[in-house]
Image: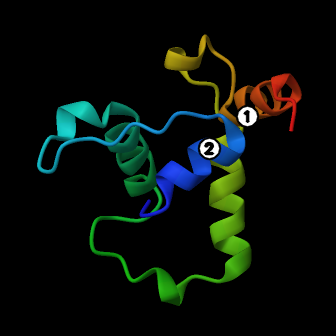
């Protein structure tokens, strides 16, 4: 995130950074960590999992509807956002 200002200039997408040690400011991140722990308990060495297994979990999480997204999936919301951008 060290180049977040350049990213914002190039893409026109604002970047907001949370304060350190403030998990309540990172609700989506904390929720995603909880979802990941359903597959990989805290402290799991991810290097023991194949790229295919990690890709499968990624796909499952990105195609799982979320209440905070109006019951759309993260993949749907990303596609919507990309289709609305004029790059």
Residue shown at 62%/44% (left/top)?
Answer: 9
On the image, which quarter does residue 6 sit in? bottom right
Question: SS of the residue at dot 1?
Answer: helix
First along the sequence among labels 2 and 1:
2
On the image, which quarter does residue 56 sit in? bottom right
Residue shown at 47%/39% (left/top)?
Answer: 15
The residue closer to the viewer here, 84 or 63, is 84
Indicate which label's residue lies in the foreground, 2 or 1. 2
Q: Which colour scheme is used?
A: rainbow
Residue tagged 1: 78
Q: Is residue 23 above or below residue 85?
A: below
Q: Is residue 69 left or right of residue 29?
A: right
Q: Is residue 36 above or below residue 86?
A: below
Q: Distance between the residues labelled 2 and 1?
A: 20 Å
Q: In this view, does 35 lie above or below 36?
A: above
Residue tagged 2: 9
Question: SS of the residue at dot 2?
Answer: helix
Residue shown at 32%/32% (left/top)?
Answer: 27
């Amino acid at each position: 995130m060290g180049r977040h200002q350049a990213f914002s200039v190039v893409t026109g997408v604002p970047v907001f950074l949370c304060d350190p040690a403030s998990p309540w400011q990172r609700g989506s991140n904390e929720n995603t960590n909880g979802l990941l722990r359903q597959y990989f308990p805290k402290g799991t060495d991810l290097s023991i999992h194949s790229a295919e297994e990690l890709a499968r979990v990624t796909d499952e999480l990105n195609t799982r509807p979320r209440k905070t997204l109006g019951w759309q999936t993260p993949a749907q919301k990303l596609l919507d956002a990309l289709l609305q951008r004029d790059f």
